[in-house]
Image (cartoon, rainbow, N blue to C red):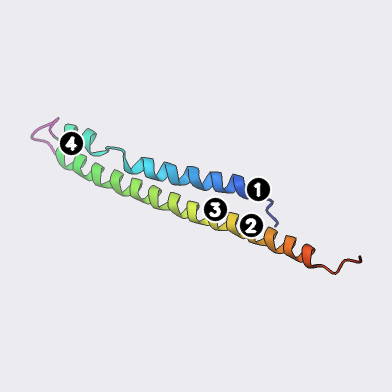
Amino acid sequence: MTLHVDPHTLRAFAASASGAADASEKRNIRAPYAHSQSAFLGTGFSTAAACGHIATAQALANLRQRSFEVTDISSSAANDCDIVETGFAAALTSADLPA
C-alpha cells in the first residue's frame, strides 16, 4: 500500500501530537483525588481514591508516551518524504539532457 502524504501536513500533525502530550503533563490530576480521600472517613474510599490516582497518573503517562512516539514516527516519515523528494529532484537535475 502506498501512502501519499504532504510532509508539511505530517509535520503539523506531529506538532499537534507533541503539544497534546505536553499539555497532558500540566494537568493536575492529584487535586480531585486528594479532595475525595477524606470524603468518607472510616471507609475504604480513601484507599480507592489513592489507587484511582495512581491508575489515572499511569494511564496519562502512557498516553503521553504514545503521543511522543506518534510525534517521532510522523516527523521521521515527513523527513523521509523530503529526502525522497530531494533525491528525485537531484536525479532529474543530473540527468543527461541533450543540449
Residue at mark 1 to residue at mark 4: CA–CA distance: 46 Å
Q: Which of the two labelled residues, at mark 1 and mark 2, occupies the earlier sequence position?
A: 1
Residue type at mark 1 is: Asp
Q: Which of the two labelled residues, at mark 2 and mark 4, occupies the earlier sequence position?
A: 4
Give the x, y percent position of residue 86: 68, 60
Secondary structure of the residue carrying numbered label 2: helix
Q: Is residue 94 left or right of residue 66?
A: right
Instruction: Specify the principal SS of the magenta part.
Output: loop
Q: Which of the two labelled residues, at mark 2 and mark 3, occupies the earlier sequence position?
A: 3
Residue type at mark 3 is: Ser
Residue nearest the viewer, comparing 26 with 7: 7
Mark 4 vs mark 3, foreground winner is 3
For disc 2, the marked residue is 82
| Outermost residue to the top | 39
Instruction: Relative to 90, say whether 20 is above or below.
Output: above
Residue nearest the viewer, comparing 20 with 79: 79
Residue type at mark 2 is: Asp
Decide whether residue 50 is among the magenta residues. Answer: no
Secondary structure of the residue carrying numbered label 4: helix
Residue type at mark 4 is: Ala
Give the x, y percent position of residue 77: 58, 57
For disc 4, the marked residue is 34
Q: Which residues are magenta?
A: 38-45
| Outermost residue to the left | 42
Give the x, y percent position of residue 81: 64, 57
Q: Which of the two labelled residues, at mark 1 and mark 3, occupies the earlier sequence position?
A: 1
Which quadrant of the figure contains the C terminus? bottom right
Which quadrant of the figure contains the N terminus? bottom right
